[in-house]
Amino acid sequence: MPRLLLLLPATTYRAEAFLAAARRLNLDVTVASDGATILKAQRPTDFLYLNFRDPDEASRAVVSIARQSPIDAVIGVDEPTTVLAAHLSVALNLPHNDVASVSAARNKHLMRQLLRRHHVPVPNFAVFPHTAAPASLVGQIAFPCVVKPLILSASCGVIRADNPAEFDAAFRRVSALLTALGLTVLDEAGHLILVEDFVPGREVALEGLLTAGTLRVLALFDKPDPLDGPFFEETIYITPSRLPDRTQQAIAACAQSAARALGLREGPVHGEFRINDGGVWVVELAARSIGGQCSRTVHFAADLSLEELILRHALRLPLPSLERAAGAAGVMMVPIPSRGALQEVRGQDDARRVSGIEALTITATPGEELVPLPEGTRYLGFLVARGATPDAVESALREAHRRLTVVLRAESAGARPLPPPARPGVVTF
């Protein structure tokens, strides 16, 4: 029976989907994590603590275990763990992406340097120390621009600035976030901030699988909400895309060129692209699958989930047909409307009754302090819908979201209750 080493951060949304796929394939699974997790209590003999920040230490531990129980594949479910997975695969002599390639896909500056070197379209960019005085940098950038950390995801810390005053505020805000998250101490890239030209246009997401360097597009997602700033909160993904076939082919070609430029050859990739009159521009290309619970929208006609496909590919097991299931699917990453302690989310049953809604999961817990973008690092939850057409799916997601009301307790003590707003809404106490 093949053995899988699954690298799961303590806070990941992805655990159950990958474990369910492993059960379907009848795999032996060792879960490795960097902190406390409920999986340890559920599977005590298959749990391994690893220091995710020390690849050499982690490699020694895994090699020692593999001498007793051989490991056939290592899977990382997010960007930090994909880098560690590449290190561990080298130590175990398993097929893998080059460590430098996966590291470049995680670091926005290294990625853009490689893409530019290989003539893959990226906006003009520069990096600066997070301690720099913003006023001293204005002559080196163009407006509008986007200020962002090098190593965070889900639009955390990403801010548009249209003039020097906005740039000053945005740069200081990102610097403060890096310090607050401890990244200036924990990671070399946490000392730097990327500033790049704002690229107008529509944004899409691509889910793909690389085999010996050749990309197979698994899904292309429209993002129907405009992402023009000042923050870039992603909400709705819809597949299949409604873009013309010629445009979709251009996006796929750009993704293939980007993977080649980074040196990625095996496994899942998740890309973000902008399309305008100048062509297709790369925003990101990560060496991982789509995050959160969004993978539930990528389902194949052979009753194959995205996670099962990834595991089959890593273990070199036969792949059934990769034709997608009929119809359209979509997900809404339910946004956090404002800062405050979560009391409850009203209207959940009402939202689930919307035709086409397949699931609503509130991942935030009562009493948890919620922080919206750009400082926030998570979502309130996820809505998943299916329907005959992309338009029907989008309508279902928007209607279900309209029926939700988020009840928060504000940070300031003694705030008086506010009357319930029109849904979707927020009640703050």
Image: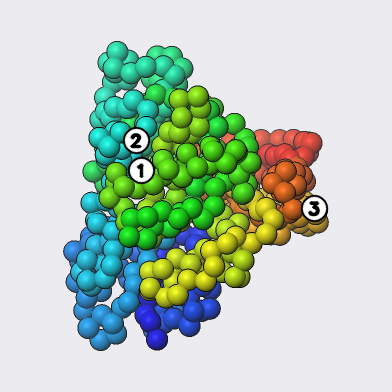
Q: Residue at x 44, y 19 (%)?
A: 144
**Which is closer to the viewer, label 3 or label 2?**
2
Q: Residue at x 51, y 27 (%)?
A: 276
Q: Name the residue type under label 2.
A: Val
Q: Are marks 1 and 2 in contact (CB under 8 Å)?
A: yes
Q: Earlier in the sequence, mark 1 or mark 3?
A: 1
Q: Which residue is mark 3?
A: 354
Residue farthest to the front, as pictured: 246
Mark 3 or mark 2, which has the lower sequence index? 2
Determine the CA span between mark 3 and mark 2.
Answer: 42 Å
Which corner quadrant of the image does residue 138 belong to?
top left
Q: Amino acid at mark 3?
A: Val
Question: Dot 1, crowdedness within 10 Å: few (<14), some or many (≥20)?
Answer: some
Question: Disc 1 versus disc 2: distance between alpha carbons?
Answer: 7 Å
Residue bearing the label numbered 2: 120
* Residue 140 coordinates in the image, percent (x, y): 29, 17
Question: How far across and down, in percent of the image, does residue 89 sit?
Answer: 26, 67
Task: Work out which quarter of the rendered image holds the N terminus and state it.
Answer: bottom left
Closer to us: 424 or 210: 210
Q: Which element carries disc 3, helix, strand or loop?
A: loop
Q: Which residue is mark 1?
A: 257
Considering the numbered disc 2 on the image, is that residue within a helix, a strand or a loop? loop
At 26% from the left and 80% from the top, the residue drawn is 66
Whether residue 130 appears in this view of the structure is no
Identified at 66% across, 53% down, the residue is 329
How far across and down, in percent of the image, does residue 380 sit?
A: 60, 49
